[in-house]
Image: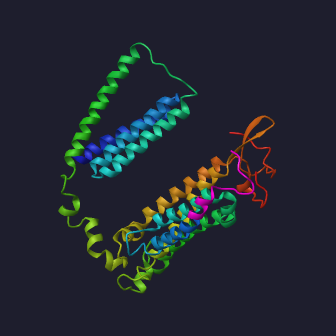
Amino acid sequence: MIETLISMLIFFMIIGAIIALETTDLLSAVISIGAIGSVASICYLFVGAPDIASTQLVVEVLTIIILIRATIRHDLITIDGDREFFGLTITLALIFVLFLFGIKAFNNLFDFGNPAISQLPEAPSNRYLACGFQETGANNILSAILFDYRGLDTFGQLCVLFAGIWGAFAIMRVQSRRKKTGKGDGNEDR
Amino acid sequence: MKTDNKYPGMSLIVKNTAKAVMGLIFLFGIYLTLYGHISPASGFSGGVVFACTFILMTLAFGKDVVLKFLGKTTAYVLNCVAALLFLLIASLGVFYSGNFFENFLEKMYPSANFRLFSAGVIPFYNLLMAINIGAGLFMVFIIFAVRRVVDTDGKRKLISTEFFDIKKGESQ
């Protein structure tokens, strides 16, 4: 049951990606990307990761705002006449379908107060708690998880931060390194 | 924004308070970093505290004092080398134990409870994470701190000269 629902959602995401690639105006492409992200967050809900789902939703909304702000300057689309009614119907139907999917996903989650760690003995959290010290030697279980069990995640986090810092460094630099005059003049103003 | 050339930074009270507090804050950052595998702390919070020390120093004494300690090249090198060493230690697990991010030191030398030198490679990860985060956050702060609007020929311009070539004794 869940597999069919997830494959339907993935099919929807593929359609959204094709639309985002093939459409001619930038605004539709941005909105298709947003639709892909929202459906991906519902996929995360189905596989039982509500925290990742909320993160995905927040990041997607932020990305859409930034992308629309960046692209709305170039072309402004006004929808007129009968296209408006058609688009509104499609939008409402899609929102309703996604709402039904969301309700289904919430029914699929574990009950509040009974997480997976208390119901499945083979859950990874049980292993962290049971033999975390014997395997890693770290008394702080948070350090043991962050740097040993999920070290690759931490390394990815470090890489994201590293790239962000260097990107900020490259963007905020006023004086380009090529034409260095040393006295502070001859640089572009931003 | 015009600063006095002779006495850059804030007033005497702020400077003296910062002088008294700064060392303790740095010491607390070292504690958070080194005891990250034993007590509730980690390299991330330690690095943020390191960066906060230098930010406090910048706010109190002006940027010229700080850029002598931790200039452009030092912050670059610390940030990059810490990230590369993180990857190197993670790759050493492949050679010694067969898995990426394997705790090979703990496998070879099992450690006692609640010791400073325990938990294999996790303290090294904490240390490198603290250095990386501290240098990176300080870089982000100093980028904003060294930007300055000056009037040249009636036109307002943003310049950031001092971060790129530091000249001692020459301030604006």
Residue B1 seen from this side: yes
Q: Is residue A134 above or below residue B32?
A: below
Q: How was this image coloured?
A: rainbow
At x 32%, y 22%, the residue is A89
- Foreground of the two, B172 or B37: B172
**A4 on left or right of A30:** left
User: Is residue B100 in view?
Assistant: no
Q: Main secondary structure of the magenta part?
A: loop
Q: Based on the picture, tell me whether residue B10 belongs to the magenta stretch.
A: yes
Instruction: Estimate the x, y position of residue B64 in percent, counting from the top left.
Output: 70, 59
Residue B142: % across, % down? 63, 55
- Does the magenta run of residues contain A120? no
Which corner quadrant holds the C terminus of chain A? top right
Residue at (43% x, 81% y) in the render: B116
In-front residue for pair A28/B47 = B47
Residue at 50% x, 38% y is A66
The image quadrant of residue B164 is bottom right
Viewer-proximal residue among A43 and B103: B103
| Above/below status of A75 relative to B55 | above
Is residue B58 found left or right of B123 in the rendered image?
Answer: right
Indicate the position of residue B147 as horizontal and vertical percent values. Answer: 67, 48
Q: Residue A65, image x and y in percent? A: 47, 36
Q: Return the residue found at the far top.
A: A81
When the figure is inspected, residue B13 is found, relative to residue A34, above or below; the finding is: below
The part of the chain drawn in magenta is B1-17
**Residue depicted at 48% across the width and 67% down the height:** B46
